[in-house]
Structure formats: C-alpha cells, structure tokens
Amino acid sequence: MKARVIKRFRDKFTKKAHNFGTLYEGSKERIEELQSFGWLGETEKEATNAHDEHLNGSIAEVKAKTEGFSVDAFEELLDQEKQSKNRKGVIEYFESMIEIGKSSEPPDGEGE
C-alpha cells in the first residue's frame, strides 16, 4: 500500500526520512499506524503518469490540484509546463515548491 506523506517524519524502523508530499510504501497496518499519528494522508492507488491532467486549468486550479506533491513530482511537472504552456505563474509556483521541499530537513525521530 502507498499513502502520501502529509507531515515530515523519520521512520523508527528504517530510520529513513519521509518528506512532505512524497509517497510512503508499507504494510496496511504500518500505514494505518502512521495515519493515526497524522503523518500520512489517504492511501493512493498505484501511481500513473497522469500528471498532464494536473496542468489543465487556471494557475489557481493547478496550484490546488498539485498541493502536497513531492519535489520529484514538481520537477516533472515543471519540465512538462515549460515544454507546453510555459506559464510564468505556474513555473514560479513549481520552482518555489521545489526550493521549499529541498530546504526542509526531517526531525530526528518520530513523535517529537
């Protein structure tokens, strides 16, 4: 199962940091436990390459559709936006979200 990280944390078992917007993959029980702490959102279906649909609409709609995405997803969408509509507002938003995601550091342990 997979679920989107909604609050940055470090897994107490693997010691791996999981940043906001990334996908966490684990057992159903582990995902439910992390959801109870408020660190994971709803479980997601297998990821598909349907990012193009997130670029449709106004700049405000694109921002709403991509809220909580990972740095990797924003980088991919940024490339797609530059190659297609090349909207300044969308590009600036994606670049700022990438910068924020890269500058974030996870806490040292769960449940601080």
Image: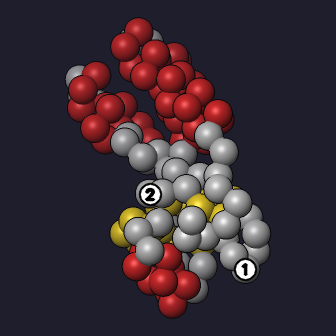
Q: State which quadrant residue 54 falls in.
A: top left
Residue positioned 65% across, 52% down in the render:
106
Q: Is residue 53 left or right of residue 16?
A: left
Q: State which quadrant residue 45 falls in.
A: bottom left
| Residue 57 vs residue 27, the one in the foreground | 27
| Residue 55 vs residue 92, the one in the foreground | 92
Considering every residue shown, the one lying at the far top of the view is 88
Residue wearing tag 1: 13
Amino acid type, label 1: Phe
Amino acid type, label 2: Ile
Label 2 CA crowd tier, 10 Å (few <14, some 14–19, many 20+):
many
The picture places residue 96, in percent across and down from the top left corner, at: 50, 23
Considering every residue shown, the one lying at the far bottom of the view is 29
Residue wearing tag 2: 6
* 38 vs 108: above or below: below
Q: Earlier in the sequence, mark 2 or mark 1?
A: 2
Residue positioned 45% across, 67% down in the render:
40
The picture places residue 61, in percent across and down from the top left corner, at: 24, 32
